[in-house]
Each structure stands twice: as C-alpha cells, then as structure tokens.
Image: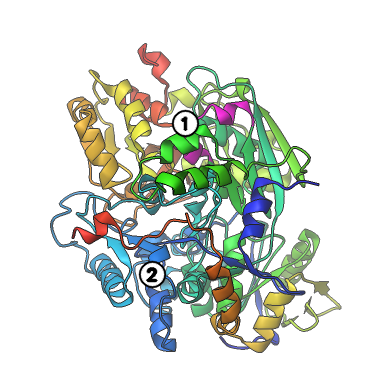
C-alpha cells in the first residue's frame, strides 16, 4: 500500500525509532522569534550547551515590535528588553537574525517562504502555532513550545508521536468573490475547533490546485485553528514556480534534482487516510465569524445565530457566552454590524496578494468616517514590494494607516491594540476574547471583505461597492 | 524538572470548553524573559470578575484544575503552563487538550490528565458539594480519586508518564543518541536549504 504526503515526509525524517518511544525527528528549518525563545537560550546556557545547527536556524523580530517609528528604540522597556535579548542570544550562538529595520525583517511565516527557505518535503518548526503555514509547500510544519525550542536548538531534533492522517478534499472551484480565507473559515465552522485534533491534514482537490502559493499559505496557516497537528498541500508546478529564483532555492543541477524529488512527495494513488472530509467549493461564499473562536462563523449573507440552534448544551453555553462578550443579538444580519477598526495583515493574510486585493477595493474610495483601517505588511519585503507597486498610495489616499511589518494587531503585543468594546474586522486568525486588546471584539474576514468593510463602516463585501 | 508521582490537593471546577491560551495568559504578559513570575497573568481578564471561580475563597490554594474539553487550544505559548505552575497548579484535568499545550505541560512538569467527559462532570459535582475534598492524582496508576469512592482513570502517553515519573531532562536523553543524529545528518539530501552563509547575511 502506498503512502500519503505526510507519511512520506515524516518517515524521511526519522532519526531514531524505538518501541515505547516517540519517533526522534530531524528538523530541517528552525524559525526563531523574540517571544518564545529567551527561556530556551537561557536553558542552553545553564546546561553549557551549544546550538547544534546554526546553519538550519534563522531568527526575526515580529511579535513584539512596533509598526511605527521603527528606526527609534522601542518605547516599551519590557518589549525592548525582550528584543535586545534575542539580539544578544543570536550573536552569542551564531544565529542569523533579521532585526527591526532590516529589509528581510517580518513575521517568521512570511519571511521563510519569501527567502525560499521553506521547501517541499522539509520539516519546519517554530515556537509559534501558525508554523502550519509552511505546509503549503508540502513541508511538515508545526508549532512547538519553548521547551521544544530548546530541544531543537540543542539537538536539531524533536520527539514526536506520529499523528493520524486526514484528507480534506475541496471539490469544484471557488466562486467569484470567495477566497482561500472564506474556504478555511467555512471548513472550521463545519468541523469545529477540535476537529483536526491528532491529525496531519492534507488539503487536496481541484479548488486547492487552483489556489496560488500565497492563498495556499492562508489555508494551511489556519490548520491550527481547528486543532490539526499540521496542514499540508502536495507540491506542484505552482509551488516550483513560486520557489524558483528565490535566494535560498536550489540552483542548477541541484534545482533539477530537487524538483524530481519533490514530485515524488504527492500521496500515492493507493494510499489511504485515517479520516476524510469533503467540501464543495461552489458552496463557499464570503465568510465571517460572529463569536470568540474561529469555528463560530457564518456566511456574510447570514445572521447572528441563536444559541438554541446548536445541538449540544456545551455549544449553546459557548454561544451564549460568545454573544455576551461580542455584544451581539441573535437574528442580526451580519452586514448590519458596525465596525470601528479594520486590520489587514498577519501571517494569515499579510502577503503581497492580500494587500493587492485589499488595495483594489479601497482604491479611489474613502474609509468610512468613524472607522480606522490599519494595513500592516507581513514583512519588510512585502512592504517594499507594495510601495514599488504603488499599493501604499491606494491605502493612504483612502485614509488608511500604512505601517511597518510585524504581527501587530493580530495579537496586540505591541501598541497596536483594540480598546475595550472596540469592534474589528480582521484578516488575522484568532477572534479569542481580548486577543487584539483587552475587551476588543474581533470578526475574522478575508482581505477583500476587510477592505469593503472599511469603506462601508459595517461588515460588507466588495460587490456592495460595485467592486470585485 | 521535578519528579511527579502522586499529588494530593483540592480541585477547582472551570466550567468552560475551548479555553484558549490567550485566556490562560494574555499576550501582554509574555514579554518577560524568565521562566517564572507569570502567576499574575493567569486568567488575567477573567480574574477581574470577583465571581470568577478562581477568585472564590473556597478554592484558595487549589492545585488541580478541572475543565471542559479543548483546554489550551490556540497559541503555542508555554507561558500558559508556567503561569499555571506559578499559581500553584500541578494537574489540569480535561476531556481533551490542545496538542501543543499538552506537550508543553509534559515538558515543564504540569500533569495534563485526559479523562472522559462524564468523569469531569462527576468531579465538578463532587467539588461543588465539598470544595475542601482532597483529590489524589496517581501518575503511576493513572487514576484520579476523591472521597465517596469517586475514581476515574486518566490517559497520558507512556513516554510522558515515564519522563514525569523520573523527572528527566528531554534534551539530555536525546543527546545520548548523538551518534544516531550524526548518522542521519551524514545522509541528508544535498539540496536541503541552509540559512548560513547567505548573500543577504554576509552583506551586512
């Protein structure tokens, strides 16, 4: 019997397999940032250990950095200490770092693919749950905690028990106005936030094949939001075209050898998955969350649900609690919900295609009075490219704020936060209570819906503007 | 890491499902560079409500958190585990844990005990009836027991159980297999990328 994509990549990375023990897996690429690494480096120092493979490690500053005045010292002394600690650690242990102000600085999950470091068939880990993003290349990529970061730094390996496999097959094609973000939000609403628990998921089918590399990253990014260990897509011509010519992509004979190898990674025809889920792409329309977890979503055409509609007592209680926090009344049309803040950015939707799509909607229009729109490129590279294309002008002329690169308002660790009671349409990945700032309320949306919402001052889609 | 064999203490019922790590400790508390000192961030927002279960006098000093399914989903922040430990918790009981949280717990000496949903209900009812009930969590036997014959098995993988019982440092165990890692490295595919040296890096 054949193997699945996930099984092939897993098996190729087993350093040691022994009865009663998890597999010891080799790590091809370790991404590091300032928030989840200081205690790991300190652990190395206390034990007198070195970083085993600095040449398979790369660091960037993203979670805790400001997106304005990036040439100034960081104002918050605690944030500054954390960032300076990363700089010291990288210097001490010989790790390549892209600090604030560097042209390659940015969110780790935007920077890795952009540099061509994320490649098919590799294992990629990072002390960040959205490491699943890199699965879009057919890499086995997952988030780890700080103890595991220390383990990878010291050994370049991780102890892991092999999860089961799941196929999510998206048949047909996405309709006009439906995006990768809508697709994955609709999927999570269907399967629930725990639906992927214990699985390495492979997204496949015609609709996935038709997605660009960046759209595939959006889908894989959200894998953790339904609990999956990893989310992967088999590499194909789209993948190879994206990679070729990037700074760390193989060249010459190495490129040919790599592509030949990458083609072998696709799931064999006679392989089976432990679980299968099917979705008809034609049913996907712009999607938006109403609650406080990414599974609490409805089509934008829908209404705020009544908790009584949910089958289990547990879901009903969660819905009641979410509605109270979100200050929403059942039956309200989603399009009638007024929005005071729009955030475009994050490792989910902060890449160049996302910014282009949002810019196309706001170009020659104005952000509604009383609404603030924040556009935060996923990396300095994305920002520079956007500026070269004149995209920044479309945003600033519409009245949006054009910022420096970082995680920003996705998690509100830096000064980009919602105030209590503020309501945000956000292209990020989590609508948890207080995620974007204490008391803030989040509706997850695509870049297109975010941009239309900014113009309308309420949740809405580009079609309402005669755009898109 | 401290060894874990048997723990006795009182329990606190947290009647929520899908408690994400942003709730366990909000991002603004993650700026410290130490491994301790995170207790003040534990459930920081929920604790502002005087009626929140962890604020109630009868649960003062509780060391076992009994909660609904999907505890610890979301962000990978190990700070969530450290905050629970700093606040005096040694055990979290839930029908299902977020993957990364469960792993982080095992690495830092917090026991993540997975039990049937019906056993969570039974524990909640028993603690409601008597908040001072002593609960015993036995990692060797993988059981949780209270008064009046209340007893529930819990699930934990063999390897994590073994490491917790021994209080072993994972890194040291893995480094004992250094020859196997080196053998793997000698046979890695030649076209795998490296971060060093690089044109962009060398130019600075």
Q: Residue at x 73, y 48 (%)?
A: A3
Residue A252 point in image, percent of width and height: 40, 45
Predominant SS of the magenta segment: helix
Q: Residue furthest front?
A: A253
Magenta stretch, residue numbers: A205-219
Is A58 left, or right, of B74 in this rendering?
A: left
Q: Is residue A439 visible?
A: no
* Figure quadrant of residue A65: bottom left
Q: Indicate yes or no whether the magenta region holds residue A218.
A: yes
Residue B117 showing in the rendered view: yes
Q: Position of residue A444 (x, y in %)?
A: 46, 37
Count numbered badges in the picture. Answer: 2
Tell me which residue sits at (68%, 57%) in the image. B69
Q: Which residue is mark 2?
A: A54
Q: Is residue B160 magenta?
A: no
Q: Residue at x 56, y 80 (%)?
A: B178
């Amino acid at each position: 019997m054949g193997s699945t994509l996930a099984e092939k990549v897993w098996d190729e990375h087993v350093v040691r397999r022994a009865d009663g023990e998890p597999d010891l897996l080799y790590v091809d690429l370790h991404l590091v940032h300032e928030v989840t690494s200081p205690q790991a480096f300190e652990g190395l120092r206390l034990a007198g250990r070195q970083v085993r493979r600095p040449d398979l490690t790369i660091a960037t500053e993203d979670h805790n950095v400001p997106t304005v005045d990036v040439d100034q010292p960081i104002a918050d002394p605690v944030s500054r200490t954390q960032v300076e600690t990363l700089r010291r650690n990288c210097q001490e242990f010989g790790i390549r770092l892209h600090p604030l102000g560097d042209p390659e600085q940015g969110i780790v999950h935007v920077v890795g693919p952009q540099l061509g470091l994320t490649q098919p068939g590799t294992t990629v880990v990072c002390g960040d749950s959205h490491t699943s993003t890199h699965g879009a290349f057919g890499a086995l990529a997952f988030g780890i905690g700080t103890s595991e970061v220390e383990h990878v730094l010291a050994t370049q390996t991780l102890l892991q028990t092999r999860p089961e496999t799941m196929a999510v097959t998206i048949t047909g094609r996405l309709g006009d106005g439906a995006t990768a973000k809508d697709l994955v939000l609709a999927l999570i609403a269907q399967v629930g936030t725990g639906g992927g628990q214990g699985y390495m998921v492979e997204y496949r089918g015609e609709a996935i094949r038709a997605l660009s590399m960046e759209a595939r990253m959006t889908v894989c990014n959200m894998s953790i939001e339904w609990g999956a260990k990893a989310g992967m897509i088999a590499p194909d011509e789209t993948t190879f075209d994206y990679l070729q010519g990037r700074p760390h992509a193989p060249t010459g004979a190495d490129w040919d050898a790599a592509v030949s190898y990458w083609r072998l990674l696709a799931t064999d025809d006679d392989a089976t998955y432990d679980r299968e889920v099917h979705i008809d792409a034609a049913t996907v329309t712009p999607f938006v969350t109403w609650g406080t977890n990414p599974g609490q979503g409805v089509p934008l055409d829908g209404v705020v649900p009544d908790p009584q509609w949910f089958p289990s007592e547990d879901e009903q209680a969660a819905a009641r609690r979410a509605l109270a926090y979100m200050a929403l009344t059942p039956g309200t049309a989603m399009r009638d919900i007024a929005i005071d803040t729009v955030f475009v950015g994050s490792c989910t939707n902060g890449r160049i295609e996302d910014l282009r799509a949002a810019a196309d909607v706001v170009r020659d229009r104005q952000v509604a009075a009383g609404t603030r729109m924040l556009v935060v490129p996923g990396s300095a590279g994305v920002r520079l490219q956007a500026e070269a294309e004149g995209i920044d002008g479309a945003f600033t002329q519409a009245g949006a704020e054009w910022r420096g690169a970082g995680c920003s308002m996705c998690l509100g660790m830096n000064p980009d936060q919602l105030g209590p009671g503020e309501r945000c349409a956000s292209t990020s990945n989590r609508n948890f209570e207080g995620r974007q700032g204490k008391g803030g309320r989040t509706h997850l949306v695509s870049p297109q819906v975010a941009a239309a919402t900014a113009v309308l001052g309420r949740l809405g889609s580009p079609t309402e503007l005669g755009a898109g | 890491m401290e060894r874990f064999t048997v723990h006795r203490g009182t329990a606190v019922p947290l009647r929520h499902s899908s408690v994400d790590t942003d709730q366990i400790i909000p991002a603004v508390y993650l700026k410290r560079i130490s491994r301790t000192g995170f207790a003040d961030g534990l459930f920081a927002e929920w604790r502002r409500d005087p009626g929140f279960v962890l604020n109630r006098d009868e649960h003062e000093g509780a060391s076992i958190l009994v909660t609904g399914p999907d505890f610890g989903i979301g962000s990978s922040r190990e700070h969530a585990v450290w905050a629970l430990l700093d606040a005096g918790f040694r055990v979290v009981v839930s029908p299902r844990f977020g993957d990364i949280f469960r792993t982080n717990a095992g690495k830092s000496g917090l026991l993540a005990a997975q039990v049937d949903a019906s056993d969570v209900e039974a524990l909640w009812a028993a603690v409601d009836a008597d908040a001072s009930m002593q609960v015993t969590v036995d990692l060797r036997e993988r059981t949780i027991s209270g008064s009046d014959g209340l007893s529930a098995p819990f699930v934990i993988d063999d390897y994590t159980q073994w490491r917790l019982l021994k209080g072993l440092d994972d890194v040291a165990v893995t480094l004992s297999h250094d020859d196997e890692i080196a053998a793997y490295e000698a046979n890695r595919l030649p076209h795998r990328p490296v971060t060093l040296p690089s044109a962009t890096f060398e130019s600075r």
